[in-house]
Amino acid sequence: MKMVALMGSPRKRGNTDLLVEAFFAGAKSKGAEVEKVWLNDLRIHGCQACLACHKTGRCRQRDDMTGVYERLLAADFWVLATPVYWWGPTAQLKTAIDRWYCLCYGEQPKLLKGKKMVLLTTCADEPKVATPYLRGMLKQAIGFLQMEWAGEIAVQAGPKGEVAKKPAELARARALGIKAAGGKRLKSSAQC
Ligand SMILES: Cc1cc2nc3c(=O)[nH]c(=O)nc-3n(C[C@H](O)[C@H](O)[C@H](O)COP(=O)(O)O)c2cc1C
């Protein structure tokens, strides 16, 4: 099983990263292949609404999103990892999500159908206050792509690295990683 994490936070070794590390530790213990994609390190432009993808199934823009599409299509399992920024995902993650538009056309919907996704998120406020819009938006998006929601971990943390002081939350993330990787292997996919 291949897993790819879209890292929405700009902070390496930050709270969301630590949560992903715990999730991946669990998944790797079950043999999953894992990869983090640090969106903040990439050059990804916003969707230009040119709608060229409606005809071709491909995005006309040539930037670092090309490699992200390849990884998303090759993975069985997506990890959307983001701190809550203004009750939603970070701009880095939202920009990449807008660029999923081309995945709705051509052969790609068939390739995405049945892939799974988890949300790993951190927030300074209580998760029940901070996360409803983020979760709601991602659940709608994943449903639209006919992918499956495979769970979430939302942890309250503010200062960088605070999640390291929350072993119970890290254990939950690890357990979700084990569960996620324990599922049956999904169909592999072609390149974008
Ligand atoms: C621009 C910005 C906006 C934020 N907005 C929220 C918010 O709406 N709700 C919340 O609970 N925390 C908010 N936070 C706090 C972060 O979600 C929190 O510190 C998180 O743990 C950071 O994760 P990271 O270390 O992975 O970057 C915000 C932080 C920043 C920098």
Image (cartoon, rainbow, N blue to C red):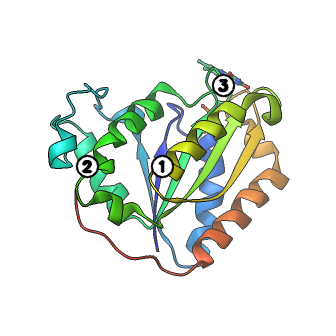
Q: Amino acid at mark 3?
A: Trp
Which dot, 3 or 2, sits closer to the camera? 3
The residue to which callout 2 is attached is 67
Identify the amino acid type marked 1: Phe
Residue type marked 2: Gly
Q: Position of residue 38 (x, y in %)?
A: 42, 41
**x then y, percent, for residue 9:** 53, 34
Q: Name the element at disc 1.
A: helix
Q: Which labelled disc corresponds to residue 144?
A: 1
What label sits on residue 87 in the rendered view?
3
Q: Quadrant of the C terminus?
A: bottom left
Q: Secondary structure at mark 3?
A: loop
Precedes in sequence: disc 1 or disc 2? 2
From the top left corner, tell me how far across and down residue 96 is, in percent: 38, 37
Circle 1 packing at 10 Å, graded few (<14), some (14-19), many (20+), is few
Depth check, front residue: 63 or 105: 105
Label 3 – label 1 distance at C-alpha: 21 Å
Residue name at image x 59 percent, y 69 percent: 27
Q: Secondary structure at mark 2?
A: helix
